[in-house]
Image (cartoon, helix red, strand yellow):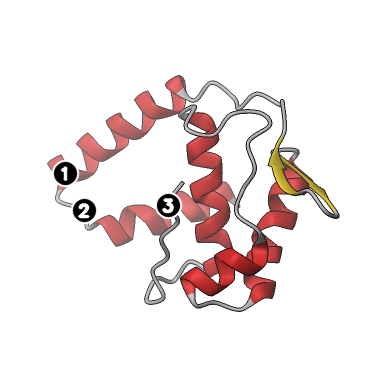
Amino acid sequence: MLFRIDPASDEPLYAQLAAQVRTAVAHGELRAGERLPSARDLAESLEVNLHTVLHAYQELRDEGLVDLRRGRGAVVTGHTAPDLSELHTAVGALVATARRLRVAPETVTTLVKEALR
């Protein structure tokens, strides 16, 4: 799996990494038992602090998506990702409405984040 981060994004780097793993699990790109790169290797390849990667991995562990074990690293668990088809449909409708109303993507993102609080 190829990880990418956007240092200019408002989203924290650890959250960007965790979101990429969640998406890969949801789309079946990462399966149960697959290992994620070691935190040290990933931090070096992305040129970020080791604690940034560890924070992402710990968040994923707390959600039950990965298992962290000394010596084994981060391994995708057998927990299935939720079916997001209904959410994809709703997001598609939101995007269509935003385009029709000519609402900026940043405004839509802000509105969604506020609604989730």
Residue 48 or residue 13, whichever sits in front: 48
Mark 3, residue position: 2
Instruction: Classify residue 70 as left or right of residue 78.
Output: right
The answer to which of marks 3 and 2 sits earlier in the sequence is 3
Give the CA distance from mark 3 to mark 1: 30 Å
Q: Tag 2, which secondary structure?
A: loop
Type of the residue with mark 1: Arg
Q: Tag 1, which secondary structure?
A: helix
The answer to whether residue 70 is above or below residue 65 is below
Mark 1, residue position: 99
Residues at badges 3 and 1 in contact (C-beta under 8 Å)? no
The answer to which of marks 3 and 1 sits earlier in the sequence is 3
Type of the residue with mark 2: Val
Task: Look at discs 3 and 1 and give the one toward the viewer.
Answer: 3
- Label of residue 103 in the image: 2
Give the CA distance from mark 2 to mark 1: 6 Å
Residues at badges 2 and 1 in contact (C-beta under 8 Å)? yes
Residue 17 or residue 116, whichever sits in front: 17
Visible residue check, residue 115: no
Type of the residue with mark 3: Leu
